[in-house]
Image: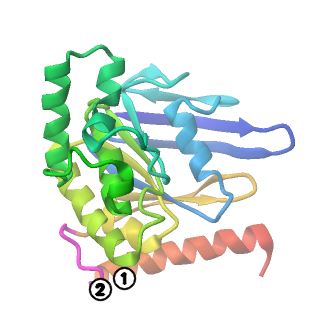
Amino acid sequence: MALVANNLLKEFESFIAIKDVSFRVKDGEFVCIIGPSGCGKTTLLRMIAGLEKITGGEILLDGRGVVKPGKDRGFVFQEYTLFPWRTAQKNVEFGLEIQGMGKNERKELAKKYIDLVGLSGFESRYPKELSGGMQQRVAIARSLVNNPEILLMDEPFGALDAQTRNLMQVELLRMWEKEHKTILFVTHSVDEAVFLADRVIVMTTAPGGIREIVEVKVDRPRIRTDTEVNRVRDRLLSLLNISYKESFGD
């Protein structure tokens, strides 16, 4: 198994954010995490990234304990988090530069991933010269170029308009099928989760736990209005409604 979470617990000073969270993600699997606002989705992702300290339990990546950030995990934030003073090319090269890779080698490798995300010809553009969707493509390329074992994505398309968001979902699946990366993807959108995921982890609130893990047994490419897609969507909406009622009442 690529990723294993066992009985995760996360406590802050005044409350328990996550409790008794356990799941497994297989190599090359695309898994989405959904749940009510405040259920700990981002906290869970940050724990896996090593950006948030674990209070209890364990996270294993290919059998190795996760205790701090590492290049085996790439993280794509909701905000584009690009360096405004660096071009798209230089943003993608940044991690390779930190690792000490030679100039020509990192330039060639960065170009490969810029081409992969569909930005060939935009290498010399600065973030302010790129649309939101293009900036997020740069951020994805910057993560992929470091060859992580798992890509962690926290609402990466949340700030995009609906048309661009749908396009980015299609592009992400294309990249995933080509690169065979394991992806753990946090989203508030049930439609997005059903379109993208092999499985969907549905979280509860107060504290954050796992309500159910739903398998999406629909062949790709998926048609958003397909009967089976609608059935899975209805199931997820039902689970989210149960979680909301348990936390806040009818």
Q: Specify the segment rendered in magenta.
A: 219-226
Q: Give the camera-side residue of 184 and 237.
A: 184
Quadrant of the rendering where the N terminus is positioned: top left
**Disc sitting over residue 46 in the figure:** none
Compared with 189, 12 (above or below) is above
Q: Position of residue 38 (x, y in %)?
A: 68, 58
Residue 221 is one of the magenta-drawn residues: yes
Q: Position of residue 48 (x, y in %)?
A: 51, 35
* Residue at 84% from the left image edge and 37% from the top image edge: 13
| Residue that badge 1 annotates | 230
Compared with 185, 160 (above or below) is below
For label 1, count other residues whose C-alpha is less than 10 Å away and answer few (under 14), some (14-19) or many (20+): some
Q: Earlier in the sequence, mark 2 or mark 1?
A: 2
Q: Give the camera-side residue of 235 and 222.
A: 222
Q: Is residue 134 visible?
A: yes
Compared with 52, 210 (above or below) is below
Q: Is residue 1 visible?
A: no
Q: Is residue 130 left or right of residue 41?
A: left
Q: Would you identify the image quadrant in which residue 130 lies?
A: bottom left
| Residue that badge 2 annotates | 225
- Identify which amino acid the numbered label 2 is placed on: Thr
Q: Position of residue 97 (x, y in %)?
A: 31, 21
Q: Give the camera-side residue of 250 and 81.
A: 81
